[in-house]
Amino acid sequence: MKILWAPWRGVFLTEKKDICIFCEKPKENNDEKNFIFSRRKYVFGMLNKYPYNSGHLMISPYRHVINIEDLTKEEWNDMIDLLNDCIKAIKKIMSPNGFNIGFNIGKIAGAGYEHIHLHIVPRWLGDTNFMPILSETKVISEHLEETYKKLINYFK
């Protein structure tokens, strides 16, 4: 296997997991640093700092909720409204061919944090090219800061 230098990934692997980013990051009031691009009454949207693809977004309630069935109707409605706005934004600024949208609930399902959050992953024809298959390498084609700037301008 060839090695692609990706120091940002090392930060994820060594990052303390004793705090819940979905509880703590919104309290910091440093949205640019935390890539929070939208705040609603019950939920907020932020870029995934360790994305599967360019434009990988997450939507989470402010309230610490582990089980999806414990979301209130207000949280669900706010989440779906922001989801719709995120889809419109990503379509306009990135022109993907499709999306993967979903929840990872519980550690066994891949949840890095047990705080409900919805993933929105834009997909393009060819984004599953030879790199992951032959080289075990994923290429993220746009820097988080660039994506964040586009989203902030859209949501203003």
Image (tube, helix red, strand yellow):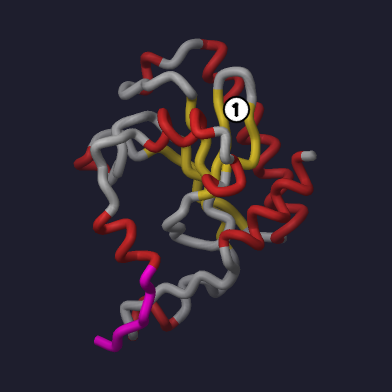
Query: Chief secondary structure of the magenta span?
Result: loop
Rendered view: 150 above or below 68: below
The N terminus: image quadrant = bottom left
- On the image, the x and y values in percent for residue 80 come to 60, 27
Name the residue: 77% across, 46% down.
Answer: 154
**At which x and y percent is residue 123?**
56, 60
Q: Could you say which is closer to the camera, residue 118 or residue 23?
A: 23
Where residue 37 appears, as percent x and y from the top left, is 64, 41
Q: Quadrant of the C terminus?
A: top right
**Residue 120 or residue 100, whichever sits in front:** 120
Query: Is residue 118 magenta-colored?
Result: no
Image position of 139 with respect to 108: above or below: below
Q: Which residue does the numbered mark 1 point to in the structure image?
A: 80
The image quadrant of residue 39 is top right
| Location of residue 66 (image quadrant) | top left
Q: Which residues are magenta?
A: 1-7
Write the residue at 36% across / 71% down. Answer: 7
Location of residue 82 by image quarter: top right
Q: Residue at x 61, y 47 (%)?
A: 32
SS at circle 1: helix
Q: Amino acid at mark 1?
A: Ile
Outermost residue on the bottom side: it is 2
Relative side of 61 to 89, left or right: left
Q: Tell me, yes or no, whether the highlighted magenta stretch contains residue 3.
A: yes
